[in-house]
Image (cartoon, grey):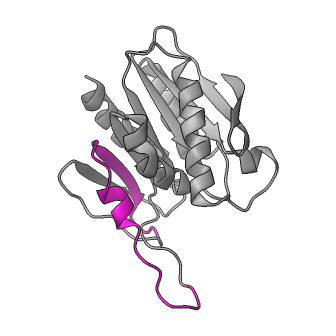
Amino acid sequence: MSVHEVDTPHGTAQLHVTDVAAPSGLLVLGHGAGGGVDAPDLLAVCAAAAERGVLAVRVLQPYRVAGRRAPAPARQLDAAFIAAVAAARELAPPSVPLVVGGRSSGARVACRTAGELGATGVLCLAFPLQPGPRKSGPAPSRLPELEAVAAPVLIVQGERDSFGMPPTAPGREVVQVAGDHALKRDVPAVVSAVTTWLDALLA
C-alpha cells in the first residue's frame, strides 16, 4: 500500500493505493462524512479488488487530511474528488475502465461526479437515501442523485440502515446484507456482492 498527496481546488487530498501490477481496472472510493479511509468495508473491498487485478484507491478528502471532522460543502467534496480521480488515473494505464464509489457521503459524491469522470460503474456502500430528521421538517430524498447516474450502479445496503433502503431500477442493483449503516456485521457478504458485480462489469 502506498499513499500519495494530491493538490485539489480545496486543499490537499490523499490517495491510499492498494497497488497491483498491470491493473485491469481502476476503483476509486471515497469515505463517509465523519469517517476515513480505514472503514472495514472500504478496506475489505479494496483488498478483494486488488486480488482481481484492479488498482484500488481510497480518497481521503482535504477536510479530513486537515484534521477536521465536519464535512466540506458538496461542491467542494465533488471538486476535490474529481481532482483525486484525475491523479489516480495517472497510476493506471489510460485504457482501463474506471469505477468510482464510496461509502455513505462518498457514495453520493461518486454519483454526482460519475458522468463528468466518465465512469464505467458506480459502487455505493451504504447510500444515505433519506437524511436524518431536522427541525424544519422532512429533508428531501437523495434518490435523484442515484437516478442521475447513467452508468451501472451497485448499492450494498444494511437491512437495518436508518438512512433507508434505495429502490432497485434498470441499471441499479441493490444488495441487502445483515447489519446497519456501518456495514460491519457481515463484511464478507459486502465483499461477495461487490466482487460478483465487479467481475461482471469488468469482464
Residue at left offset 25%, top offset 51%: 172
Residue at left offset 53%, top offset 45%: 41
Q: Quadrant of residue 120?
A: top left
Q: Quadrant of residue 32?
A: bottom right
Establish if 90 lies above or below 81.
Answer: above
Q: Is residue 189 visible?
A: no
Q: Which quadrant, please, contains the C terminus?
A: top left
- Residue 8 at x, y = what percent? 67, 38
- Residue 158 at x, y = what percent? 42, 60
**Residue 196 lies in the magenta-colored region:** no
Establish if 83 lies above or below 104.
Answer: above
Q: Observer-nearest residue: 166 or 80?
A: 80
- Residue 114 at x, y = what percent? 40, 43
Q: Is residue 61 visible?
A: yes
Magenta span dominant secondary structure: loop
Q: Observer-nearest residue: 51 or 10?
A: 10
Which residues, given as a range, are shown in magenta? 134-162
Q: Is residue 201 left or right of residue 159?
A: left
Q: Quadrant of residue 69?
A: bottom right
Residue at left offset 51%, top offset 9%: 21
Q: Is residue 180 left or right of residue 31?
A: left
Q: Which quadrant, please, contains the N terminus?
A: top right
Residue at left offset 59%, top offset 26%: 87
- Residue 46 at x, y = what percent? 52, 32
Number of labelled discs? 0
Establish if 133 lies above or below 157.
Answer: below
Residue lying furthest right in this view?
67
